[in-house]
Amino acid sequence: MQTKKDSGWIWTPDWTVKDQQVPKLVLFRRSMMITSSVNAAKVKVTADSRYKFYVNGRLVEVGPLKGNQKKWYFDELDISNYLHVGLNVIGVKVLRYPPVHRAGNYGVVRTKMPGLYIQGEIDTDEGTYPLVTDSGWKTFNEHRFEIVSEANDFAPLQIYEKSSGSEVSQKWLMVDADLTSWKPAKLYEQTDIPTILKVENLQQRTVPFMRRRLARFGGIKQLVQTDSSLEIWNSFLLDDQPIAIAANQRTIVEITANAEQTGYLRLSVAGGAGTRIKILQSEAYVKPETQTVNGLTIHVKGDREDEKNGYLDGFYDTYTVGGTGTSASPEVYVPFWLRTFRFIRLEIETGDQPLTLTQFNYESTGYPLTVKTEVQTSDASLHQIWQLSERTLRRCMHETYEDCPYYEQQQYLMDTRAQILYTYAISADDRLARKAIDDFKCSQNPDGTLNASSPNFEENIIPTFSVYYIWMVYDHMMYFDDHQLLKDNLETIKRILTYFEAHVTDEGYLDNLGGLNGISRYWSFIDWAAEWNQTSGVPTAVKYGPVTIESLLYLYGLQAAIKIMIHLGFDKLANKYLDQAEKLRAAIKRNCIGENGMIQDGPGLAIYSQHAQVFGILTHVLSYEQGRLSLVRTIEHRQDYAQCSVAMSFYLFAALKQVGLYSESNQYWDIWRRMLAKHCTTSVEAEAGERSECHAWGALALYELPTTILGVSPATPGYRTVSIKPTPGYLKWAKGSVKTPVGVVNVDWRMKDGQMNLNYDAPVEVELEEE
C-alpha cells in the first residue's frame, strides 16, 4: 500500500552499483482478479528510461514519449479491451539506460533514478480496482540481457542486444508463471524523486502513439549456407511453414524486406537449446572498398541489391535459444527497440539439439502520417522520386523527427526544419512539428545557442543550426498562425539572436563561431559537400578565419525574426532586428564579395562555394542579376566551387527559383535519379560518402512538387490566403491536389507556346502569379 510519503515510483530491490553503470532490462508483473465486466480502464504510465506495457500477453504500447532536459512525459493507455473477467496479468518491461552519455541512447534523456510509474483504475460493473505501482508488484532483474554497442567510435543508438532465452523470459506473462525468483518491488519515497520525475511535473503525451502493423519479409535474397531449398525458405518466410535445422549445423541465409523498413523483429523457434542466432540488419550490399568521411570509415556502395559483387554490412543482435519452445508454444525473440533494415542476414549455429524455425516476421512502426497531397508532372521520374521521398520521410518519423533511423535516430535542427515543411506540404499535420519546436526550445544553453539535436543527453552544438529553429517558428506561423506558440518561443528567439549579436566583429560580420567536429567545442557544420569532407562539413575558409556563410545564416535568421515580430505587433523589436540585418548585409557586401561579384567563403579569401551564393540570394545580399550570374557560374564550372549536396538542395532549389533558374532543377533531380539507378529505396545522406541510406533532408520532392511546381503556399499567416504561383522550370504540365490547414487546393497547369494555362480550385482567397 502507498503512504503519503510514497512517490508512486517503483524499482527492483536488487539493484547494484554495477547495474547503475550499464543498460539493463527489468521486468515488472502484477496479477489482478476481475469478477465482472470491464466498463473502462485507463492508466498513466511512464518510466526511466523506456517501457513496453503488456496486458494478458499482448503488447499495448511502447513509451514513454521521448522527453527532453526540461520535460518528462507520461502516456495514458486505454487497456479496457485487453482485460477480461478472471485472472489478468499486467506486465511491463523497462529498458533502463544509465546516466552516462555514451552508455545509453543519445536521444533518450534519463535521470540518476531508474523507475516505473503507473497510476490508474479499472471500472467494472461491481466496482473500481486501482492499478498503481506499489510494493504489490513483482520484479525481475534480467541478467541474461545485455546491450552491445554498435561501434567503437561513434555509437549513438546503444540498442543492439546479446541475450539468452529462459523460462522467465518466455513465460513471465503467463498466468501460471513461476515467480519464485522474483522480488517484491521497492517503492521510492518522495524525497528520492528527481524534480523532473515528480508526479506533479509529469507532462501528458503530445503526439499520437506510433502505428504498429504486422508485416512479412519479401523472401530470400540469397542462400549462403543451408541444407534447405529456396522454395522451403520462402514458404517459411511467406507462409509460416516451419523449417527444420539439424543439430551441429551452420546455416546462413540473406533475406530482403524489399525496401528500407523500421519495425520490431519477431523470430519464433522450437527446441534447439543452445543454438546461437545472429540477426544482422543491413541497409544495402556494400563493396569491400572503404573511404573516410568525417573521421568515420564507411564502405563504398554501388547497386544496393548486388549480392554478387557486394556483401551485407551492418549491426546485429545475438540470441542464444533457451530450448523452452514447442511447435504449439514456440520460444519467441523480439528485440526491445525498433530496428531499421532492408536486408537481414540470418546466421544460425545449432548445438547438440535440432532447431525448428516456426516464424520470422516484423511489426512495422512509425508516426501515423496520413499523406493527402498528390502531384503528377510531365516528368515521370519525379513520381519515382516522390515515392522514394515519402518512404524516406516516414522512416525518419517516430516519436521525434530523426536524421536517420539506422545510425542515429537523433532529431537535428537543420534536418527537422526541412522535414517539418515536407510534412506540412503533404499532410498539414503539425503535431510532431510542435513537439520538435518545443524540444529545441527546451534545449537552449546559457549562451543562447540551442542544441543541434534534441532531445539529447549531452551538449551538442552547431551554432548556426539555431537559425533553422527561428525558421521553424516562422514556418508554423505561415501555415497555422498559433499566436500562443509564437509568444511561447519569443524569448528563445531573442536569446539566439543575442548570441549572434555578441559575435559581431568590428568589421560588422561574425567571428568564428566554432570549428571542426571533434576538435572545437562548437562545430561549424554547413553541408556534406565533397570538397569539405576533410574539414568535417565545414567550409575550408575556417582554416583562415571567419566563415561567411555563418554570417549569411545569421542574416537569414534575422529576416525570419523580423517577419515574426511584425506579425505579432512588436514593431520596436522588429526595427531593432531590421537595423542589425541592414548593418550585417552591408558588412558582408563590403568585406566578403570578390572582384568577380561572388560572395567569398571567408572575408577577403578567393575561395567560393555554391552555398555562399545560394544564401546570398536568399538573404538579398546579392541582387537578382548578380545572384543569377553567380549561381550560373557555380553550375557551369562545378569543379571550381563546392556544390550543395542532398542536405542543402532545399535551399539551392529555393535560390534557383528566386533568380529565374528553376529550369536547372532538372539536372539537380539527377541526384535522386542516380539513387534510383543504384536501387536505393530511400534518400542517401550525401553522395560524397553514402553512409546513411535514409536521411529525410533528402525527401525534397514532397515540398518542391506541391509548393514550387504546383505553386501552392500560404500567402498570409495561417493560410488565410493561399498563393498559387507555379514555377514550371523544365516541365510541360503538372496537376494535383495539395492538403493545407484550410482544406485542399487543386491545381492543373499546362504550358503552350511559352504561356501557362492555369486552372485551380481553393477554399480561401487566392493570390495568383502576377502577369
Image (spheres, grey):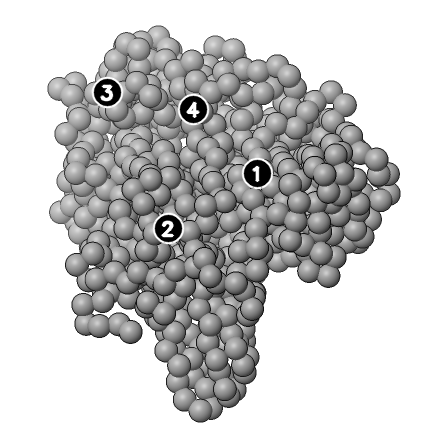
Instruction: Work out whether residue 437 can be spotted.
Output: no
Residue 40: percent from the left, percent from the top?
Answer: 46, 81
Please name the residue that numbered disc 1 is placed on: 317
The residues bearing labels 2 and 1 have C-alpha atoms spaced at a distance of: 20 Å
Furthest residue to the front? 180
Q: Is residue 49 left or right of residue 299?
A: left
* Mark toward the viewer: 3 or 1: 1
Q: Residue at x 26, y 72 (%)?
A: 2
Residue 173: percent from the left, percent from the top?
Answer: 53, 64
First of labels 3, 2 by sequence position? 2
Task: Give yes or no for contact between labels 3 and 1 (Cβ–Cβ under 8 Å).
Answer: no
Which kind of residue does numbered mark 1 sit on? Answer: Asp
Q: Residue at x 41, y 89 (%)?
A: 127
Residue nearer the viewer, 66 or 140: 140
Please name the residue that numbered disc 2 is placed on: 49
Q: Residue at x 29, y 32 (%)?
A: 461
First of labels 2, 1 by sequence position? 2
The residues bearing labels 3 and 2 have C-alpha atoms spaced at a distance of: 38 Å
Neighbours of disc 2 within 10 Å: few (<14), some (14-19), many (20+): many
Task: Give yes or no for contact between labels 2 and 4 (Cβ–Cβ under 8 Å).
Answer: no
The residues bearing labels 3 and 1 have C-alpha atoms spaced at a distance of: 43 Å
Mark carried by residue 153: 4
Residue 231: percent from the left, percent from the top?
Answer: 86, 43
